[in-house]
Amino acid sequence: MLVSFLNSNFFLALTTLVVGGFAIYLYLKQKEDRKRDAAKLILQEIRYAEQKIRKYREVKSYKLYDKLLPTNSWNDNIHLFIKELKETEIDLISDFYAKASYIDTLINIISQQKNNPPIIVTSPTSSFQQSITPATPGVQPVENFQILAPPQPVEVSLLPLPISQKILEDVSMNVEFIYNTPVVEKLREIANRKWYQLF
Protein backbone atom coordinates (compact mmCIF):
# COMPACT_ATOMS: atom_id res chain seq x y z
CA MET A 1 0.00 0.00 0.00
CA LEU A 2 2.88 2.41 0.84
CA VAL A 3 4.60 1.55 -2.45
CA SER A 4 1.44 2.21 -4.42
CA PHE A 5 1.01 5.57 -2.61
CA LEU A 6 4.61 6.56 -3.42
CA ASN A 7 4.01 5.68 -7.07
CA SER A 8 0.69 7.53 -7.23
CA ASN A 9 0.17 10.77 -9.14
CA PHE A 10 -0.97 12.47 -5.94
CA PHE A 11 2.40 11.86 -4.25
CA LEU A 12 4.29 13.10 -7.34
CA ALA A 13 2.11 16.22 -7.47
CA LEU A 14 2.59 16.83 -3.75
CA THR A 15 6.37 16.41 -4.05
CA THR A 16 6.49 18.80 -7.01
CA LEU A 17 4.41 21.33 -5.09
CA VAL A 18 6.65 21.15 -2.00
CA VAL A 19 9.87 21.40 -4.02
CA GLY A 20 8.47 24.24 -6.14
CA GLY A 21 7.24 26.11 -3.05
CA PHE A 22 10.64 25.76 -1.39
CA ALA A 23 12.40 27.05 -4.55
CA ILE A 24 10.08 30.09 -4.66
CA TYR A 25 10.72 30.75 -0.96
CA LEU A 26 14.50 30.60 -1.49
CA TYR A 27 14.26 32.98 -4.46
CA LEU A 28 12.20 35.49 -2.48
CA LYS A 29 14.52 35.18 0.52
CA GLN A 30 17.61 35.81 -1.62
CA LYS A 31 15.94 38.84 -3.20
CA GLU A 32 14.97 40.20 0.23
CA ASP A 33 18.49 39.52 1.60
CA ARG A 34 19.99 41.44 -1.31
CA LYS A 35 17.60 44.36 -0.72
CA ARG A 36 18.38 44.38 3.01
CA ASP A 37 22.15 44.33 2.38
CA ALA A 38 21.85 47.10 -0.23
CA ALA A 39 19.82 49.23 2.20
CA LYS A 40 22.53 48.80 4.86
CA LEU A 41 25.24 49.89 2.41
CA ILE A 42 23.22 52.90 1.24
CA LEU A 43 22.64 53.98 4.84
CA GLN A 44 26.37 53.74 5.52
CA GLU A 45 27.24 55.70 2.37
CA ILE A 46 24.77 58.49 3.19
CA ARG A 47 26.01 58.74 6.79
CA TYR A 48 29.67 58.81 5.71
CA ALA A 49 29.13 61.41 2.95
CA GLU A 50 27.11 63.67 5.25
CA GLN A 51 29.84 63.44 7.88
CA LYS A 52 32.45 64.64 5.33
CA ILE A 53 30.22 67.48 4.13
CA ARG A 54 29.46 68.62 7.70
CA LYS A 55 33.19 68.71 8.42
CA TYR A 56 33.76 70.75 5.24
CA ARG A 57 31.17 73.29 6.36
CA GLU A 58 33.11 73.77 9.60
CA VAL A 59 36.64 74.05 8.20
CA LYS A 60 35.89 75.01 4.54
CA SER A 61 38.26 72.39 3.19
CA TYR A 62 38.35 68.78 2.04
CA LYS A 63 41.46 66.67 2.20
CA LEU A 64 42.71 65.95 -1.32
CA TYR A 65 42.35 62.23 -0.64
CA ASP A 66 38.75 62.58 0.60
CA LYS A 67 36.10 60.65 -1.28
CA LEU A 68 32.52 61.06 -0.19
CA LEU A 69 31.29 57.99 -2.07
CA PRO A 70 33.99 55.31 -2.27
CA THR A 71 31.18 53.10 -3.57
CA ASN A 72 27.79 53.99 -5.03
CA SER A 73 25.29 51.34 -3.97
CA TRP A 74 22.29 53.54 -4.73
CA ASN A 75 22.91 53.67 -8.49
CA ASP A 76 23.53 49.92 -8.58
CA ASN A 77 20.46 48.95 -6.52
CA ILE A 78 17.83 51.64 -7.05
CA HIS A 79 15.61 49.07 -8.83
CA LEU A 80 15.24 47.11 -5.58
CA PHE A 81 13.42 50.01 -3.89
CA ILE A 82 11.06 51.15 -6.66
CA LYS A 83 8.05 49.43 -5.08
CA GLU A 84 8.77 50.58 -1.53
CA LEU A 85 9.69 54.24 -2.01
CA LYS A 86 7.68 57.07 -3.57
CA GLU A 87 9.01 58.92 -6.60
CA THR A 88 9.78 62.01 -4.54
CA GLU A 89 11.72 59.89 -2.02
CA ILE A 90 13.74 58.26 -4.80
CA ASP A 91 14.42 61.72 -6.26
CA LEU A 92 15.63 63.00 -2.87
CA ILE A 93 18.15 60.16 -2.48
CA SER A 94 19.23 60.41 -6.14
CA ASP A 95 19.81 64.16 -5.76
CA PHE A 96 21.97 63.58 -2.68
CA TYR A 97 24.06 60.97 -4.50
CA ALA A 98 24.42 63.20 -7.60
CA LYS A 99 25.75 66.12 -5.53
CA ALA A 100 28.08 63.90 -3.49
CA SER A 101 29.44 62.33 -6.71
CA TYR A 102 29.99 65.79 -8.20
CA ILE A 103 31.87 66.88 -5.08
CA ASP A 104 34.11 63.82 -5.52
CA THR A 105 34.75 64.89 -9.12
CA LEU A 106 35.67 68.43 -8.04
CA ILE A 107 38.00 67.16 -5.29
CA ASN A 108 39.70 65.00 -7.90
CA ILE A 109 40.08 67.95 -10.31
CA ILE A 110 41.56 70.17 -7.59
CA SER A 111 43.91 67.38 -6.51
CA GLN A 112 45.15 66.94 -10.09
CA GLN A 113 45.64 70.69 -10.49
CA LYS A 114 47.68 70.91 -7.28
CA ASN A 115 49.74 67.78 -7.91
CA ASN A 116 50.43 68.12 -11.63
CA PRO A 117 52.01 71.05 -13.41
CA PRO A 118 49.88 72.67 -16.11
CA ILE A 119 50.08 71.17 -19.58
CA ILE A 120 52.51 73.07 -21.80
CA VAL A 121 51.75 73.12 -25.51
CA THR A 122 54.35 74.61 -27.84
CA SER A 123 53.38 76.12 -31.18
CA PRO A 124 55.18 78.39 -33.65
CA THR A 125 53.95 81.96 -33.36
CA SER A 126 55.78 83.76 -36.15
CA SER A 127 58.04 83.29 -39.15
CA PHE A 128 59.95 85.52 -41.48
CA GLN A 129 61.36 85.22 -45.00
CA GLN A 130 64.91 85.98 -46.07
CA SER A 131 66.89 85.63 -49.29
CA ILE A 132 70.23 83.95 -48.80
CA THR A 133 73.12 84.46 -51.21
CA PRO A 134 75.38 81.43 -51.24
CA ALA A 135 79.13 81.92 -51.00
CA THR A 136 79.76 79.48 -53.84
CA PRO A 137 80.10 81.19 -57.28
CA GLY A 138 77.66 79.98 -59.97
CA VAL A 139 74.96 78.86 -57.56
CA GLN A 140 71.64 80.70 -57.70
CA PRO A 141 70.43 82.33 -54.47
CA VAL A 142 67.57 80.64 -52.62
CA GLU A 143 64.55 82.90 -52.31
CA ASN A 144 61.61 82.77 -49.89
CA PHE A 145 63.48 80.52 -47.48
CA GLN A 146 61.42 80.39 -44.25
CA ILE A 147 63.04 80.51 -40.87
CA LEU A 148 60.71 79.83 -37.99
CA ALA A 149 60.97 81.77 -34.79
CA PRO A 150 61.50 79.72 -31.64
CA PRO A 151 58.24 78.22 -30.43
CA GLN A 152 56.48 80.07 -27.64
CA PRO A 153 54.97 77.98 -24.79
CA VAL A 154 51.21 78.19 -24.35
CA GLU A 155 49.76 77.19 -20.98
CA VAL A 156 46.56 75.15 -21.13
CA SER A 157 44.26 74.52 -18.17
CA LEU A 158 40.77 73.00 -18.29
CA LEU A 159 39.33 74.59 -15.15
CA PRO A 160 41.24 77.22 -13.17
CA LEU A 161 41.77 76.30 -9.53
CA PRO A 162 39.85 79.22 -7.97
CA ILE A 163 36.79 78.40 -10.11
CA SER A 164 36.96 74.73 -9.08
CA GLN A 165 37.12 75.71 -5.42
CA LYS A 166 34.20 78.13 -5.78
CA ILE A 167 32.03 75.46 -7.42
CA LEU A 168 33.06 73.00 -4.70
CA GLU A 169 31.99 75.44 -2.01
CA ASP A 170 28.66 76.21 -3.73
CA VAL A 171 27.75 72.54 -4.14
CA SER A 172 28.90 71.57 -0.63
CA MET A 173 26.89 74.33 1.01
CA ASN A 174 23.74 73.37 -0.92
CA VAL A 175 23.67 69.62 -0.22
CA GLU A 176 20.48 68.70 1.62
CA PHE A 177 21.16 66.28 4.47
CA ILE A 178 18.81 63.29 4.39
CA TYR A 179 20.14 60.83 6.97
CA ASN A 180 17.53 61.81 9.59
CA THR A 181 14.56 62.10 7.21
CA PRO A 182 11.55 59.79 6.81
CA VAL A 183 12.85 58.43 3.48
CA VAL A 184 16.05 57.17 5.10
CA GLU A 185 13.97 55.84 7.99
CA LYS A 186 12.21 53.63 5.41
CA LEU A 187 15.59 52.36 4.25
CA ARG A 188 16.48 51.70 7.88
CA GLU A 189 13.32 49.61 8.29
CA ILE A 190 14.20 47.59 5.18
CA ALA A 191 17.75 47.07 6.46
CA ASN A 192 16.46 45.78 9.83
CA ARG A 193 13.86 43.34 8.51
CA LYS A 194 14.09 39.81 9.87
CA TRP A 195 14.60 36.80 7.60
CA TYR A 196 10.97 35.74 7.90
CA GLN A 197 9.58 39.16 6.82
CA LEU A 198 9.52 38.55 3.10
CA PHE A 199 6.65 40.88 2.36
Image: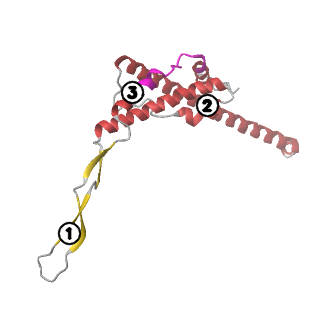
Q: Mark 2 = which residue?
A: 35
Mark identifier at residue 131: 1
Q: Residues within 10 Å of mark 2 (few under 14, many from 20)?
A: many
First-in-chain label (1 vs 2): 2
Q: Determine which quarter of the picture holds residue 143.
A: bottom left
Which is closer to the viewer, label 3 or label 2? 3
Amino acid at the residue labelled 3:
Lys
- Who is closer to the viewer here, 20 or 12? 20
Question: Type of residue at label 2?
Answer: Lys
Q: Is residue 29 left or right of residue 20?
A: left
Residue 56 visible, this orientation: yes
Residue 8: x and y, percent?
A: 87, 45
Which callout, 3 or 1, points at the residue further toward the start of the chain? 1
Magenta span covers which residues? 166-183
Whether residues under marks 3 and 2 lie with C-beta atoms below 8 angstroms apart, the answer is: no
Q: Position of residue 66 (x, y in %)?
A: 37, 30
| Residue at position x 64%, y 32% in the image | 80
